[in-house]
Amino acid sequence: MLATAAATAVLASGCGAETPDYKSIWTTSSTTPAAPADNQPVPLWQYLEDSGVVGEPIAPEKVPHLTITMPTPPGWHTYNNPNLAPGTRMIAKGNTYPTAMMLAFTLHGDFDVPKALKEHGYADAQLSENFKQLNASNADWKGFPSAMIEGSYDLNGKRMQSYNRVVIANDGLQPPQRYLVQLTVTTYADEAAAQGPDIESIIAGFNIAKK
């Protein structure tokens, strides 16, 4: 059974505070979240779940027929935590923010990819507290359908800034196997300019390509 969990919640126990803006993270938890209010956007994870799609976590480097990578800027390091969702790849600079997290899911079940991304690709970020959008795009990424949103929000008395990109990639085989790949880069809003070069290098270097 699919359920939602904020994978970045583990940050609260060791690498900064929880970042709530991406809840399109599936786990095997049996907890079923409450449906959002009618005036709120429907998160991507909920749309997929309601469409009968099952998401299975997979390490990005173990995805067959696709190469999925993100660079590690100088001064950043791999962040390991047993509480992270299986297959999560995370890097951090220092002991708190900024961080970058990459996840992948094997998707089982058919759904309308353009509709999912256009109508639900931004919802997780938009549901964050006092979210203010800075940038957004539905343009393809590396040849695959994608949704990107960047903005700031409040978290535990701090103003955060984050970049989130969701990509629905496929292996090109017949029938094609789809994967949901997500990159989240988060920093304190007042440090965004100073951390900009590193963050931009991670975003630019995030790559998904057929082998």
Image (tube, rainbow, N blue to C red):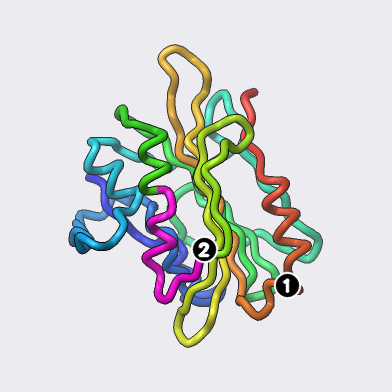
* Of the pair 187 and 143, the residue shown nearer to us: 143
How far across and how far down the image is residue 68, in percent?
Answer: 61, 38
| Magenta run includes residue 166 | no
- Residue that carries the numbered disc 1 in the rendered image: 193
How far across and how far down the image is residue 21, in percent?
Answer: 44, 64
Whether residue 95 is situated above or below residue 203 in the rendered picture: below
Residue at (20, 54) in percent of width and height: 30
Q: Quadrant of the N terminus?
A: top left
Question: Is 67 on the left or on the right of 155, as rendered?
Answer: right
Numbered disc 1: secondary structure: helix
| Magenta run includes residue 123 | yes
Residue at (45, 49) in percent of width and height: 86
Residue at (69, 69) in percent of width and height: 93
Q: Residue furthest bottom?
A: 157
- Range covered by the magenta-colored residues: 121-133
Q: Quadrant of the C terminus?
A: top right
Q: Quadrant of residue 174?
A: top left
Q: Are marks 1 and 2 in contact (CB under 8 Å)?
A: no
Residue at (19, 57) in percent of width and height: 32
- Residue that carries the numbered disc 2 in the rendered image: 81
Under mark 2, the amino acid is Asn
Numbered disc 2: secondary structure: loop
Under mark 1, the amino acid is Ala
Whether residue 119 is situated above or below residue 19 in the rendered picture: above
The answer to whether residue 83 is visible is no
